[in-house]
Amino acid sequence: MTLSARTHLQSLQLFVAVVDEGGVNRAAAVHHLAPSAVSKHIAALEDHVGAKLFVRMRGRLTLNPAGELLLYHARRVLAAANTMETEMRGLRHGIANRVVVSCNVSALNLGLASHIESFNRVSPNVVVTLREGRSEEVVAALHDRSSDLGVFATTAGSHGLLCTPWATSRLAVVFHADRGIPDEHSIAFAELLAHPFVVLGDGSEPDAMGQMLQRSAAKQGREMSIRMLVTSVAGLTALISADVGIAVLPECTTRVIARQPGIVSVPLADDWAKLGIQIGVRQDATLGMAAWALRSHLMAASPEMLA
């Protein structure tokens, strides 16, 4: 069986289905084909690559090394083909592409939305969907492929991602004016440890930056008292307004919170008290032209690094 380009893609789809569904019969059912037809496609692939792809162990098909290698490339080829189809379909409807961007609130406070708007002015046929979440949620969205680009804090990790520095913001403490913390030019983190903290997290543990602050306290032989975890900056702002505790966040965000009556923002004086913001994509990403163009635009439009 000679593989045409179209047949080659179908054979790869069926090969991946056999792996994902755990066998030929299940893959055939999902694709509404006879099992014999699926087997012919697998045999054609094996003939094309010149190697067997599966071994049968205890009645189950298991990938051998050649099959593992083909699976890696097959997933990338199929993802690229899907991206191509999406873009071409969009062109038929007057839309060059859709790009999904996930970001944390600090990225928004550093002007990410205005940079996306400037991109849209030169690429009006690209529809950009912007989703806000904690940095850990942005990383998760990249890994599960629900987002094309992510803009998030370096504390969230970057395993499996291709990341480029975008901005830096000094950390600052934000608190209610009645808390009794001096409103000075700057303040050392150690001076804050007598106060309870409200920290962003998933409801069970602090986020990566909260954990970094805990480690910083431990290095000084101190403990950071966490009064409450909250899942959003809006919720954290309400807790600060109620004087439940204090919070340490990038200054680009604390300045916004401090617009509320009675709320104060003071930068941390510690040398380590800076947070990097980066742009990330999956290392195996098969992004469309518009997504790469937006990434390049954002990298070129990096905001001024904040001291």
Image (spheres, grey):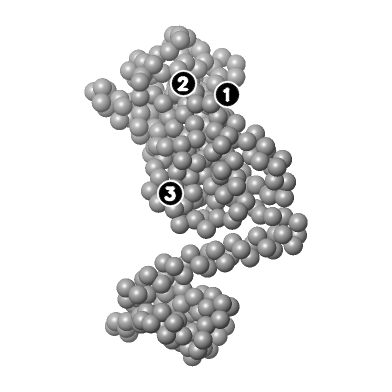
| 166 left or right of 274 in image | right
Q: Position of residue 217 (x, y in %)?
A: 30, 25
Is 300 in front, or is 166? 300
Residue 130 visible within the image: yes
| Callout 1 amino acid | Val
User: Residue 216: which quarter of the image?
Assistant: top left
Residue visible at 54% across and 17% down? 263
Residue at the disc numbered 3: 161
The structure residue drawn at horizontal position 53% and vertical position 64%, both measured from the top left corner, is: 79
Image disc number at residue 256: 1
The local secondary structure at tag 2 comes to loop
What is the residue that sits farthest to the left in this orientation? 221
- Alpha carbon distance from label 2 to label 3: 26 Å
Answer with mark 3 or mark 1, whichever residue precedes in sequence: 3
What residue would you read off at disc 2?
A: 307
Q: How many marks?
A: 3
Considering depth in this image, is 232 or 21 the residue closer to the camera? 21
Q: Which mark is residue 165?
A: none
Above or below, comparing residue 109 to residue 160 in the picture: above
| Residue type at numbered disc 3 | Leu
What x and y, as percent, mark residue 173?
Answer: 45, 20
